[in-house]
Image (spheres, grey):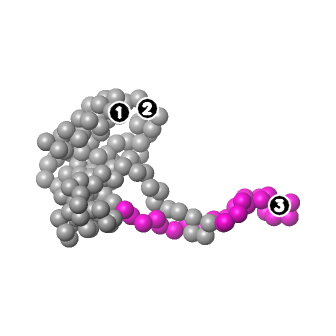
Amino acid sequence: MHHLSASDCFVGVAAVADYGIKNPSANKQKKSDDAAPGLAMAFELNPDILADVGAISEQTGKPRTVIGFAAETENLDEYATQKLRKKKAHYIIGNLAQHALGAEQVALTAYSHDQPPVRLPELPKLQAALAMLERIIL
């Protein structure tokens, strides 16, 4: 996070899991004849990197542009717009996960505070990414 003050743009591209294991074991969990089948695990929320960067940007003006992603399975417009506000991002790039995962092409939509959603047609993934960057940067 200490590099943010020297950054103009932050693109949160990693798909960080919302939850992590609360008490991970240091050792492999072995099967046991006298134990009930299955494992019990407790989960906790992972840090929200995009929200943290958005808050820093709002306070300091750096980075000037914060971009996040929303891979949803339903209600893309609603959830991406909520994420845009909640995370204090400048842009959220959204898609329907069930149509994108494992596919050669993707249909992306850009959400921002000052424009209606910008929808790209289904394109090869690299071409879609470049087209979306072009719309955001220019």
Query: Which residue corresponds to mark 2?
Result: 103
Q: Which quadrant holds residue 3? A: bottom left
Q: Residue shown at 26%/35% (left/top)?
A: 130
- Say whether marks 1 and 2 touch (CB < 8 Å): yes
State the SS at label 1.
Answer: helix
Query: Which residue corresponds to mark 1?
Result: 125
Q: Position of residue 113 (x, y in %)?
A: 17, 55
Q: Position of residue 89 (x, y in %)?
A: 25, 58
Residue type, mark 2 in image: Ala
The first of marks 3 and 1 along the sequence is 3
User: Alpha carbon of mark 1 to alpha carbon of mark 2: how far?
Assistant: 9 Å
Say the numbered circle drawn on residue 32: 3
Whether the magenta-drawn stretch holds residue 43 is answered as yes
- Residue 135 appears anywhere in the view: yes
Q: Position of residue 117 (x, y in %)?
A: 20, 45
User: Alpha carbon of mark 2 to alpha carbon of mark 3: how far?
Assistant: 41 Å
Label 3 Cα neighbours within 10 Å, binned few <14 / some 14-19 / many ≥20: few
Q: Residue shown at 39%/64% (left/top)?
A: 48
Label 1 Cα neighbours within 10 Å, binned few <14 / some 14-19 / many ≥20: some
